[in-house]
Amino acid sequence: RIGRTGRAGKTGVAVSFCPSREKVKIARVEELSGVKLSFEKPPALQDVEAESLENRVSAPASMRTLYISGGRKDKVRPGDILGALTGEAGGFTAAQVGKIEIHDTFSYVALAADIFDRALECLKEGKIKGRRFKIEPVK
């Protein structure tokens, strides 16, 4: 697996992940490219797990996601969902609405956590494009 940071003629760093059992192949890459590669050991699993747990515990979710059973095939557009939330029925601000993803048969909308429950009820009781859709929180 390789990832690089330079794009379109810019300089950058290429990072390759490979097991130590592939030292012969790595030596061949160095030989062919004329570049001496540097190596680092990956962090221990315990360190990664501890950091991941720390991040999950210390950062409360600022956004929550709703599932809507209507999508592109139902002619639902992001503006329709935004309109249902910010219009007279909802009264929420556009800043409280996050990313809206429209798929073929369903949609997702990210909402500020503090308005999530009210927005869920608003969409369940109201209509999007004049139609009612199944609305539920994403777990």
Image (tube, helix red, strand yellow):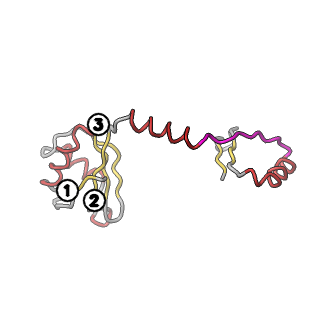
Q: Which amino acid lies under the numbered mark 3 shown in the image of this protein?
A: Ala
**Residue occupying image coordinates x 12% and y 46%:** 89
Q: In this figure, which residue is indicated by the disc labeled 1?
A: 128
Crowding near pointer 3: few (<14 within 10 Å), some, many (20+)? few
Drawn side of residue 133 relative to residue 3, left or right: left
**What x and y, as percent, mark residue 43?**
62, 40
Q: Does the magenta segment cover residue 37?
A: yes
Relative depth, front residue between 38 and 70 = 38
Numbered circles on residues, count: 3
Q: Say which amino acid is labelled 2.
A: Val
The residue that label 3 is drawn on is: 95
Instruction: Tell which of 34 and 22 is nearer to you.
Output: 22
Q: Amino acid at mark 1?
A: Ile
Q: Residue furthest top?
A: 58
- Label 2 CA crowd tier, 10 Å (few <14, some 14–19, many 20+): many
Q: Quadrant of residue 77?
A: bottom left
Residue 69: percent from the left, percent from the top?
Answer: 26, 62
Q: Which residue is mark 2?
A: 76
Q: Residue at x 80, y 55 (%)?
A: 25
Boundaries of the magenta span: 34-44
